[in-house]
């Protein structure tokens, strides 16, 4: 089974963006770590791990379908934040953008009648529903709490638990 050149190129670009997401979430985790917010930091370190897994999932797909993996240059993540709200807002904006990118990949797969690719991309379509919804929830909470009560945020995050195994 061969992946088309066009889809291969588009997936390679997505591999770069998923690794980029990994770096961005690490940087956000460090921001919370520096504030002493260990639970929130851990939440974002876990989120970073998931993005690494997403990159590897795309990468494996290209390998399995006989394409050529070329990892593009990855731009530096945003490293400083003026507030917790800004960091969470960036996460939500990011996930909304990723949803558009996954939809674009799906558009290519549909136009090429590549049913295997559509099946593969469905996993990401579903994943993005969860990712966007999680970040929307965090943003609502952080806006209500405001920075002066950030440790309340720690307790809320701690009670959310970590994503189930294999659910990345
Ligand atoms: Fe992702
Ligand atoms: Fe994500």
Image (cartoon, rainbow, N blue to C red):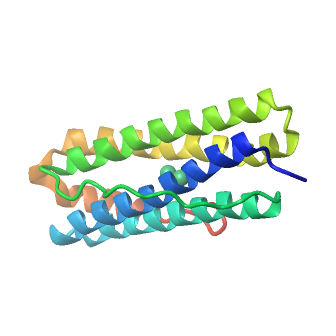
- Is residue 54 shown left or right of residue 161? right
Q: Position of residue 3 (x, y in %)?
A: 80, 49
Q: Position of residue 92 (x, y in %)?
A: 38, 41
Q: Position of residue 35 (x, y in %)?
A: 15, 67
Residue 112 or residue 34, whichever sits in front = 112
Q: Is residue 133 visible?
A: no
Give the residue furthest to the right.
1
Q: Residue at x 66, y 57 (%)?
A: 58
Q: Residue at x 40, y 44 (%)?
A: 135
- Is residue 17 shown left or right of residue 83? right
Q: Position of residue 37 (x, y in %)?
A: 22, 68
Q: On screen, 147 above or below 45?
A: above
Q: Residue at x 54, y 33 (%)?
A: 100
Answer with the quarter of the image where residue 93 lies. top left
- Is residue 66 shown left or right of residue 30? right
Query: What quarter of the picture does the C terminus occupy?
Result: bottom right
Q: Is residue 101 visible?
A: yes
- Is residue 59 shown left or right of residue 80? right
Q: How many marks?
A: 0
Q: Residue at x 84, y 38 (%)?
A: 114
Give the residue furthest to the left.
148
Residue 83 or residue 115, whichever sits in front = 115
Q: On screen, 1 above or below 110?
A: below
């Amino acid at each position: 089974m061969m992946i088309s050149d066009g889809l291969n190129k588009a997936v390679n670009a997505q591999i770069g963006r998923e690794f980029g997401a990994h770096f961005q979430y690490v940087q956000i985790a460090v921001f919370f770590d520096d504030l002493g917010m260990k639970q929130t930091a851990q939440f974002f370190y876990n989120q970073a791990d998931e993005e690494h897994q997403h990159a590897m999932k795309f990468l494996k797909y290209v390998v399995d379908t006989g394409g050529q993996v070329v990892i593009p240059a990855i731009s530096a993540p945003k490293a400083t934040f003026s507030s917790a709200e800004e960091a969470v807002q960036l996460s939500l904006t990011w996930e909304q953008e990723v949803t558009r990118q996954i939809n674009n990949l799906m558009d290519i797969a549909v136009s090429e009648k590549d049913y295997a690719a559509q099946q593969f991309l469905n996993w990401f379509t579903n994943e993005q529903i969860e990712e966007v919804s999680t970040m929307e929830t965090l943003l609502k909470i952080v806006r209500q709490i405001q920075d002066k009560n950030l440790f309340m945020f720690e307790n809320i995050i701690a009670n959310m638990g970590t994503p189930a195994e294999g659910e990345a």
